[in-house]
Amino acid sequence: MPSFTTTLLLTGNNVGIEIPEDVVWGFGAGKRVPVIVTIAGYTYPSTIAVMGGRYLLPVAAEHRKAAGVAGSPRRRRRLPASVGSRRSSTRCAEA
């Protein structure tokens, strides 16, 4: 499973996790890779999407609340992450 460090990104009311391009292409599944995301022990299925030329995993309000994280222009969290297909998993844990 590839690993990297990322930040919860806030754009308007949307929060996402930026995924490095080499990680996305490493799956060999195109640009929209289905994954399982784990943040601070909370797990949910998602799909990597392309927005504004960046690869992002959405983190909906319900998932942020369940994981106890927030996207905010005043509070940025560094997240070490491991990403895998839905057969494996995506892990993000607070640093």
Image (spheres, grey):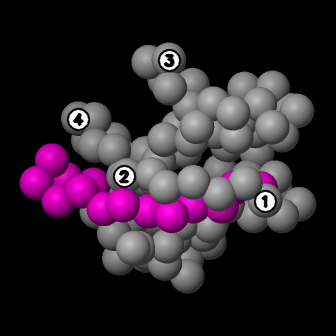
Residue annotated with mark 4: 12
Contact (Cβ within 8 Å) of mark 4 with mark 1:
no
Q: Which amino acid does label 1 sit on?
A: Met
Contact (Cβ within 8 Å) of mark 2 with mark 1:
no
Q: In which quarter of the image is the C terminus?
A: bottom left
Residue annotated with mark 3: 53
Contact (Cβ within 8 Å) of mark 3 with mark 4:
no
Q: Rounded to the nearest whole Å, what is the CA distance between mark 3 and mark 4? A: 17 Å
Q: In the rendered view, tell whether residue 40 sits above or below residue 27.
A: below
Q: In the rendered view, tell whether residue 77 sits above or below residue 68.
A: above
Residue extent of the magenta highlight: 71-84
Contact (Cβ within 8 Å) of mark 4 with mark 2:
no
Secondary-structure class at tag 2: strand
Q: Rounded to the nearest whole Å, what is the CA distance between mark 4 and mark 2? A: 13 Å
Task: Kindly report which numbered mark, 3 or 4, lies closer to the viewer in this rendering.
Answer: 3
Can residue 45 be seen here? The reply is no
Residue annotated with mark 1: 1
Query: What's the magenta bit mostly, secondary-structure-wise?
Result: loop
Badge 2 crowding class, 10 Å Cα cut-off, few under 14, some 14 to 19, many 20 or more, is: many
